[in-house]
Image (cartoon, coloured by chain):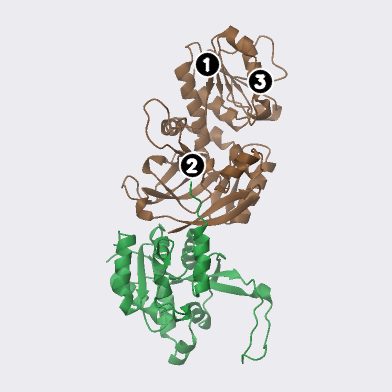
Amino acid sequence: MSRAKVFGIVLAGGMGYRMGNSDKPKQYMELGNKPIIIHTIEKFYIHPEIEKIIVLCPKAWVKHTENIIKKYIQSTSNICVIEGGETRNDTIMNAIAFVEERYGLSEDTIIVTHDSVRPFVSHRIISENIKYAKLYGACDTVIPASDTIVRSDNGDYITDIPERKYMYQGQTPQTFKAPILKEMFLSLSEEEKEILTDAAKILLLKGQKVYLVQGEVSNIKITYPFDVRVAQTLLAGEKHD
Amino acid sequence: MINTIYRLVAPRKFQMDYENIDIHNSEVIVRPTYLSICHADQRYYQGQRDPKVLEKKLPMALIHEAIGRVVYDRTGKFKIGDRVVMLPNLPPYFDEVIAENYMKGTKFRSSGYDGYLQEYIATNVDRILLLPDAIHNHVAAFLELISVAMEAINRFEQHSHVGKGVIGVWGDGNLGYITSLLLKKIYLESKIIVFGKNLEKLLDFSFADETYLINDIPDNIIVDHAFESVGGSGSGAAINQIIDLIEPEGTISIMGVSEYEVGINTRLLLEKGIVLIGNSRSSLLDFKQTIEILCKNPDTVEYLERLISCVIEVSNMQQIEEAFENDIRKSYGKTILKWNA
């Protein structure tokens, strides 16, 4: 059994229904000269601390994902593509189950979970995620909120306007010691599982501290057609010598 | 893979740009770890180059002195994690006569071509060299500058006569320090004299045989050969002082960069049959010889360590700017960036 300890978990489960007329999940759209998901996987592939990469996607996209990884990354021995789950947390649990079965879980098995639609993630962000997950058990990538956050419980009137200096916008990666996340997820009731759409929140609910890693404004999530245009504009600024 | 590049777009203004790296089209990819700021970078940063030059060369990532760790190697020559020094010269081909650093068409990082202020560097496998443990990160960060002194010494050896009793080095800055230190290690029988304008700095040249202030040189001082590492507005005065003090048929190795044309005493130059040698940058061979000499002489590494004025951890664009501003204020030595961006 392999002694790999640090896993990159690329979450490509979303079907991208928010993308308007697009018939393709957004992670498979082209950015520059290759699909968005390939840019993202490459960032993990090249990072020296990431030993294995597990890509989780809808069942119908598994073969396609394997094919494009072979086409663009070629050396694929460290990359596995498996089916995701119904929800984001189910998908992460699928990843943990796969890691456990294939490589075994130990106290210091680290999973760096990342949205496949955030191809601008940096080396520093990944390094710091691994560092602080090892130190504190869990960490989440954030940037200070630039907009004022308004809370409304009914969607009609403002309930609260929290003080902005305490507000952050969540990005990914979210990184965990895998056994801790697994244990806490399994202790959730079905009702709790329905409410908890974010892995870090599971840990919070169970009293586990989650360390903040400084993200980057550029670590955008490509969700809407507007985001694709922003990403294309950022890459189009290439200087040719 | 999307690579982040920190480019200078105007004096004192950086911008983050993003470029695709096709991993499998690259021979090697290196994650920079320690970088060092050079005077040439500062001339761009402070807008001291001709506006036409700035307009042509910017936007551009600065810094051409750096080391890093290999994260990808298609050729199999290096292991992942190997600590390497990167060569900023990117020659278009190999030429048996013209050295790579003087060849037409050679690209040079942070001079019209992106330097090392990048998340990752994709380059050719012959543009990196393995660093032995004997050379630690902070000194290795400015190995390129040391190799420039090595290059000048190699050319001096090629073009100078055998009478090398006294070698003078003009300039009490970083390059003067490194050149005189290497000369002292290579020419054991020669007397190395350093000429500078700053007494405080000259006191640091404790390895040299003699040091003199340029406006207080005793009448009996003569040199067989000389190295000029003054540059800037002091170039002309330094070269003319050398022409006055040098023995006939001596060589003057010119290393200092000047933005302006320099007027020199050609009458005396001709009369003495002096050989002028222009030197710029360095080649793969110079890097290899530099590594070899530093490994053989651990005390040289210690002397070079004394040049480090500060080490600054840099994680974002604002900290890059702060490091460059800090480098302007420093009184001596090299500013090293611990790269975490």
Q: Gap between marks 2 and 1, in whole Å? A: 29 Å
Q: Earlier in the sequence, mark 2 or mark 3?
A: 2
Same chain for the residues under marks 2 and 1 in the image:
yes
- Would you place residue B101 above or below residue B314 in this image? above
Residue kind at label 1, given as amino acid type? Ser
**Dividing the picture into quarters, in which one does residue B227 lie?**
top right
Which residue in the structure is indicated by mark 1?
B190
Residue kind at label 2, given as amino acid type? His
Q: Quadrant of the N terminus of chain A?
A: bottom left
Mark 2 near mark 3, Cβ–Cβ under 8 Å?
Answer: no
Which residue in the structure is indicated by mark 3?
B263
Q: Which mark is residue B136?
A: 2
Same chain for the residues under marks 1 and 3 in the image:
yes
Q: Nearer the viewer, residue A74 or A129?
A: A74
Chain A, chosen colour in render: green
SS state under label 3: loop
Q: Earlier in the sequence, mark 1 or mark 3?
A: 1
Same chain for the residues under marks 2 and 3 in the image:
yes
**Circle 3 Cα neighbour tier, 10 Å, few/some/many (<14 / 14–19 / ≥20):** few
Where residue B76 appears, x then y in whole percent? 31, 47
- Would you place residue B6 above or below residue B65 in this image? below
- Would you place residue A49 above or below residue A106 in this image? above
Q: Gap between marks 1 and 3, in whole Å? A: 30 Å
Chain B, chosen colour in render: brown
Subunit of mark 2?
A: B
Q: Residue furthest left?
A: A1
